[in-house]
Amino acid sequence: MLMTTNERGQDGLASEVEESAALFRLMTWLSPSFPVGSFSYSSGIEWAVEAGDITSMTTLQQWLATMLLEGAGFCDGTLLCHAYRAASATDGRMLNDVAELAAAFVPSRERHLETTAQGRAFVEIARSAWNCETLDLLASHVTGPVAYPVAVGVLAAGHRIPLPLTLHAFLHATTSNWISAGVRLIPLGQTDSQRALAALESVIAATAEKSLDAALDDLASATFRADLASMSHEAQYTRLFRS
């Protein structure tokens, strides 16, 4: 059946409204101003700077590209995808399995603190301002700590924000936070930080594509130096960051 011009216009307007709402919510939830404390974590970058592994924009960019494709970026992205799908399907048992795996998969005590503290704060704030049925599902089926990517995936599913858009925004926000830590630690100028983010655009896109297609059995990390940095940070003499 053919639609009238007016009907097509109404459908297009509704789609634009939905897209605008999705963009608004993602920008809000993943903004540095959203109070989950992301600015206080460096994911081991602080130790890597002190050890001399990261000394410039180029070495920071190389470090982060590896973390994205082969480490925390890919793993968190994959866990976000599976949490999103479990929440969308109202599968509480699967959601609990993903949440347990996410909390257990981190390589160090500080990374565990980083992801679960942010996850807890994210859920608490979301329930106050952006509550939805999937957060109720999370509360009723997951009794242990909730990792940050799991929390983001559950909330996005509850608000029916497309998964690819959510994942790309999450990885962008994660990378931006890592770069922000590097800017303060190396230190770098603001222009260099934007150059690094621009150079990592294709890496973020590749990580998102890889995460979307990954099964939970594909979860793996090959960022041994970054894992050692995360483990060594807690004994670092002088620290600005919590991880």
Image: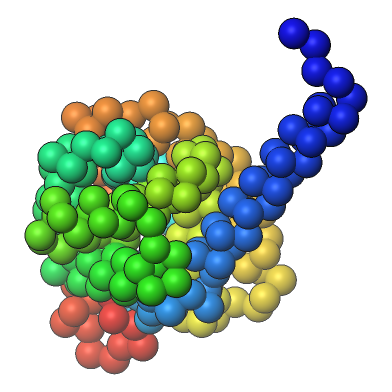
Task: Measuring from the top left, give residue 33's x and y in whole percent.
Answer: 53, 78
Residue at the limit of the structure toward the bottom, as seen here: 238
Rendered position, 99 above or below 89 = below
Residue at image location 20% in from the left, 59% down from the top: 139
Residue 230 visible (yes or no): no
Task: Measuring from the top left, give residue 53's x and y in whole percent.
Answer: 38, 65
Task: Measuring from the top left, give residue 22's x and y in whole percent.
Answer: 59, 51
| Quarter location, residue 23 | bottom right
Rendered position, 141 above or below 40 = above
The N terminus - image quarter: top right
Residue at image location 51% in from the left, 45% down from the top: 161
Residue at image location 39% in from the left, 63% down from the top: 131
Residue 87 visible (yes or no): yes
Task: Measuring from the top left, give residue 68's x and y in whole percent.
Answer: 42, 48
Q: Nearer the viewer, residue 64 or 170?
A: 170
Residue at the limit of the structure toward the right, as seen here: 5
Q: How many marks?
A: 0
Residue at image location 14% in from the left, 69% down from the top: 109
Colour mapping: rainbow
Q: Nearer the viewer, residue 48 or 169?
A: 169
Is residue 153 rendered to the left or right of residue 110? right
The C terminus - image quarter: bottom left
